[in-house]
Amino acid sequence: MKIIHGLNFDDETIAEYRVTIYQNVVKGMKVLVDARDKLEIPWQDPSRVEQAQHIMSYGNSFLDKQTFSLYAASVKELWKDSGIRIAFHRRREFQLVSKCYQSSLKEVLFHDYTPTQQDILHARKATKVITEFTITINEVPFCFIDVGGQRSQRQKWFQCFDCVTSILFLVSSSEFDQVLLEDRSTNRLLESKNIFETIVNHRAFSEVSFILFLNKTDLLKQKVENKTADISFYFPEYDEDPYKLEDVQRFILKLFESTRRDQNKGIFHHYTTAIDTENIKVVFNAVRESIVQRNITQLMLQ
């Protein structure tokens, strides 16, 4: 939101994102090393076991430039190994959040690395606290409250939702074949559906508009068109072409729309790619207008 509305990041924020990206890279490689072992994929070069052990020794400590440099060489060497590459290509079978940096790994490994806007868009950091920020658009202030999706955060949600006019609910539409990090037996898309069902039917939100963002369209398109996953395997009720993007998107939308008990309750929806700023700009302009019009209508009825 800040990027598409021309708000620049200050030096302190950029430095915070750099730390997050460093952690994404090291944790991502740690996940790949662990997955290679569990999937019983052989090393191309057995001598890289030492670098793997070094990466696995990383806990969750702060990573500034100097500390990250201690792991950078191991990350670089391990990424060269076909065993790690094979694990990466099988990432659907486990949880990997930092795929995005593999394409810009050389830049991240530079000592004087400064995150670009695209790097910041790709940065992955679990929302463990509730954050609130305001953006003024065309002289109209919009207050956003960002809440974490992790199970440990959900009991805090409802205390933040007093007087909200709209709820923007983001769904990772490409994750129909993945499981939760906290619970390896629960499908991620089903978990999102269950959360949405709880919120959309809550009596506190009977007058609140819901805007459903079916996100990660780029990854869904890639997964469907490359035929790397068949949605009907995870959702047996699916009876259309599993390799046609529009059919899969329509099914996922209906999956969420069917959760509302009041079928007259409107749910706006958009297919989005959060890292595509132009896509989000167009979508948010539509969202903004719908929110403003709804507020005007409510004021006129008072």
Image: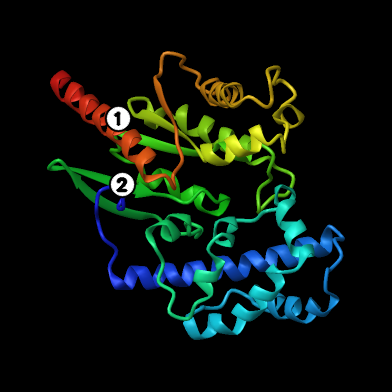
Q: Nearer the viewer, residue 180 or 39?
A: 39
Rendering colour mode: rainbow
Residue 191 seen from this side: no
Quarter of the figure with the C terminus = top left
Residue at the spot 55% in from the left edge and 56% down from the top edge: 100
| Tag shown at residue 57 | none
- Left/right of residue 138 with respect to residue 145 in the rendered view: left
Q: How many marks?
A: 2
Q: Is residue 182 above or below residue 138?
A: below
Q: In the image, what residue type sits under mark 1? A: Ala
Res. 152 image quadrant: bottom right
Q: Position of residue 174 (x, y in %)?
A: 60, 38
Q: In this image, 301 relative to 198: left or right?
A: left
Which numbered tag is attached to residue 144?
Answer: 2
Q: Secondary structure at mark 1?
A: helix
Residue at x-position 39% and y-position 49%: 146
Give how far across and how far down residue 26 sits, in percent. 61, 71
Alpha carbons under labels 1 and 2: distance apart: 16 Å
Would you name the residue on which mark 1 appears?
Answer: 286
Q: Amino acid at mark 2?
A: Phe
**Residue at the image point whose x is 26% and y is 60% from the top:** 8
> Can residue 247 be seen in the rendering of this structure?
yes
Dot 2: what SS? strand
- At label 1, counting other C-alpha atoms closer than 10 Å, the crowd grade (few under 14, some 14-19, many 20 or more) is few
In the rendered image, residue 142, in percent from the top left (x then y), is placed at: 23, 43
Q: Residue furthest top?
A: 264
Answer with mark 1 or mark 2, whichever residue precedes in sequence.
2
Q: Crowdedness of circle 2 by 10 Å Cα count: few (<14), some, many (20+)?
A: some
